[in-house]
Image: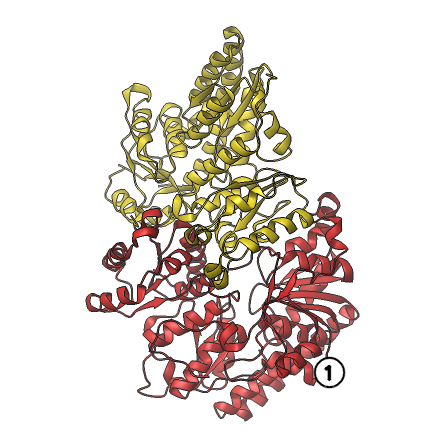
Amino acid sequence: MAKILDKQRYKCAMSAMSTVQAIERAIPVLHAGPGCAQKLSNSSGSSGYFSPNIFPCTSINEKDVVFGGETKLRSTIENSLKIIDADLYVVLTGCTPEIVGDTVEEVVQEFEDAEKPVIFASTAGFRGNNYKGHEWVINAIIEQYLEPSDKKTKGLVNIWADVPYQDEFWLGNLRELEKLVADLGLIPNTIFGYRRGIKNIKKIPEAQFNLLVSTWVGLENVKLMEEKFGIPYLHYPTLPIGAFETSKFLRTVGEFAGVDKDKVEALIAEKEDYYYYYIERYADLFLETRVMSKKFSIVADAQYTLGITKFLVNDLGLFPAKQFITDDTPLEYRKNIEEYFKDLNYDIKAEISFITDGYKIHKEIESTDYHGYPLILGGYWEKEVAAKTNAHYLNVSWPVNERLVMNSYYVGYDGGLKLIEDIYSVVKTRFN
Amino acid sequence: MSINLNISDIGTRETRLGSITGYIGDLNDLATQSSCGTLKGCARCFSQSSTCLSGCALAQLAGIRDVAVIHHGPAGCSVTGTQIYTVTKQVAAKRGIVNNTVYIGTDMNEQDTIFGAGDSLKNIVLETYKRYKPKAIFVSSSCATGVIGEDIDSIVEELKEEIDVPIAAVHCEGFKSRIWATGFDISDHAVLSSIVQPPKQKRRTINFKNFFESARNEIINIFKNFDVEPVFLYANATVEELSHLSEALATVCICGTLGNYLGNGLEEKYGVPYIRTINPLGIAGFETWLRAIGKVIDKEAEVEKYIETEREKYIPQIEEVKKELKGLKAVLAMGPGYTFEVSRVLNELGIEVVWGAAWHYDKKYEDGEVPPSMKYLLENNQNFQVSVADQQNFEILNILNTYKPDLYLSRHPGSTVWAIKQGYPAVYVADEYMIFGYRGTLDFAHSVLNTIRNRSFEKNLAKRVKLPYTKWWYKQDPGLFIQDV
């Protein structure tokens, strides 16, 4: 049922065009209204090799609504293949063609023998939000593009994590996850970002296992790959930020991959030593900054709310007030997610709320006593409630509107240090 | 033409003004074909994504202070609100005021497309009203609600019983018109039909239609010389101010594409003169525009005096920088309002326009006349290659590749970046006041000069990036995919 989206936190399924865009040399071909791409792209890093304003688009008009837009779709795909220098063409549908009943899949099938692969994902905006749309695009790649492989490469690990562009840190985070996996002596394989793309997509079926670092997004995908290609998966629900969780992450992945235990422990010892060198140098700051209170709230998708909560509790010794998960998490995952928030040091349990109504989130924050300045990490919307409640505020989740993120990341040991830098760069602007 | 304020839906620019989105030729031919009626609306059998009219319509309305825009559609339609919200807050902060406008989505899902979501919409509007007590409410349709035939008019009528502030249905299905500027008309129509009241007294004000009022203080100061006050629309305008638009001495605008519907509407319904001249960009534009205002408000002598003082200050400086710009060649691509206005200014500065692309073209405005910017060029014997390009980047890059200009200018996000990737210096003429008046013209000339003189960014980048179009495409005619409809 339609519901109030007050301080919106996600987009619609067709925003999965960003997932395609994150794959080098893959281009979305949109069967949609003329302005969908413009609305769904924000201006953060969207002018790469392909950009939303050059995505081929049938630009549906009134005539197409009445007579159907199949002819236009056919000529758009045909000419995209001629004009755009891409290696994978992913046709995505918007609301209108799906309501009027265009047979998009059939049109796409006509291009089965095209020189370059053309695949299709149904991403009408009303079918779900962009977290789901992301899964559908990955499913389309699995079902329509990947071939089973007899060849298995030992140690090859496909890594799946953030939703590109929904998470502004997606690229940096993914690269850091790759490094962590490589540190274990494994071979990371990701499909998004600089020089990964098609050649890595082709390697997917050869992997020893899929590593899903995500609270819930992507579970559907790794399950499908298990079913279709027999690739087992490791679901690691927490985005590892800082030493505590990253070391746990390395142990879990190491064990699943069959990496020698001593080797893993040696690696962790070295990394923690390095991490705590920095923490020690600034320990005085963390203890003696007079304006820093112990309580925090996070307003973000499940991924960040969980990852940052664990970091602030288990690494920095802070205490969780209520946390707000804003990604409209499908009901079937919610119970598990609640459990993840109970697994904190010293039996601390974080209370969470699955909520998409920003107004209510702000009312709750306003009525919470943080016993000092609140620390609020959230979307751009929280700038306002932070000002009202005199909070320390950092924009970490979508929408990210007044900060620039190019290749920063919060994942891993270094990511944890970066998050501390960002938080204290805000905190230090105030004395009393 | 006649504006009917009793219905909520309006005709598109295609039907009202014969506007088109595809053409290739030159200025004279475009004008000839427009006047003899042979110019046809064109389609493309290949196109790239452009802009949606609902974005234009609702961004305008969301600029008004302390109102609520309720976008009835899936989450992707209302996502534009997150960006608009930031702009609104920043524009208000610059003026030192607070704008509490909210932009709410209804997050329609699949069930809603089957059974409709009228009841939910009604509840969402009521809840929004309860939360924010907005001064006016705009309830908009989307592609999805349009296709399923959701009756937002009836819902709004029902809501009028329960809500005591102006509330209007805004029909802006994205598929309705290929000309996104129709969205500006839709927002004007909503304001005219739900907020503007018949005049009670004349005021010494001038309605000033613009985007983000960046030259606000400058214009207030200019108008003080003529004893009038500007009322800037719609960013930061209050509902109270809008209700008095009919009492102004005149309506002017910074862009004909933007201001046309409101100006004509106010003139037709309430006799407020709409000043239809070329826009105040460049010297000829600024002086023509000021003189027309002077005439309407009976301050001709004051205007002449102002022009004389300012000329003395700025013309020598402009002449000085012009020497350095002489002989440069430019390609530009903008909304039609700006394409033909900026072409004129470039000519004034001694820069030769080799190709002007307009995102769409209005054969005539609401008064039945050719847009003044176009008329001016024709009367002054300026002719150059012209296309109507609906933000089709592949056509623009093809043109740039053929003409290899010294400079590319555009006004739309995501356009200039492609020119620089192809190695051409580009100027993003984003601020509508970038070339306003003498001061703006001088600053603009310097921006162009600085861009031409330091080509580091585009040279560095172009050397390292690969372009997304095939070699095949660069050998084709840029109009290859344009078809008659």
Give how far across and how far down residue A82 sits, in percent. Answer: 69, 48
Which sits in the foreground, B250 or A207?
A: A207
Residue at 27% from the left image edge and 64% from the top image edge: B155
Residue at 33% from the left image edge and 60% from the top image edge: B150
Secondary-structure class at tag 1: loop
Which sits in the foreground, B441 or A84?
A: A84
In the figure, A31 relative to A236: above or below? below
Give how far across and how far down residue A55 sits, in percent. Answer: 58, 50
Residue B423 in view (yes/no): no
Question: Which of the chains bears the disc numbered 1?
Answer: B
Left or right: where does residue B166 sit relative to residue B468? left
Residue at 52% from the left image edge and 26% from the top image edge: A159
Q: Colour of chain A?
A: yellow
Instruction: Using the rendered view, name the quadrant where residue B390 is placed.
Output: bottom right
Q: Colour of chain B?
A: red
Which sits in the foreground, A235 or A121?
A: A121
Give how far across and how far down residue B337 sits, in percent. Answer: 58, 73
Which residue appears farthest toward the left when viewing the image?
A: B162
Residue at 33% from the left image edge and 22% from the top image edge: A344
What type is the residue that disc 1 sits on?
Asn
Q: Residues within 10 Å of mark 1 (few under 14, many from 20)?
A: few
Tally of numbered tags: 1
Residue A17 in view (yes/no): yes
In the figure, B157 relative to B311: above or below? above
Which sits in the foreground, A303 or A419?
A: A303
Residue where numbered disc 1 is placed: B381
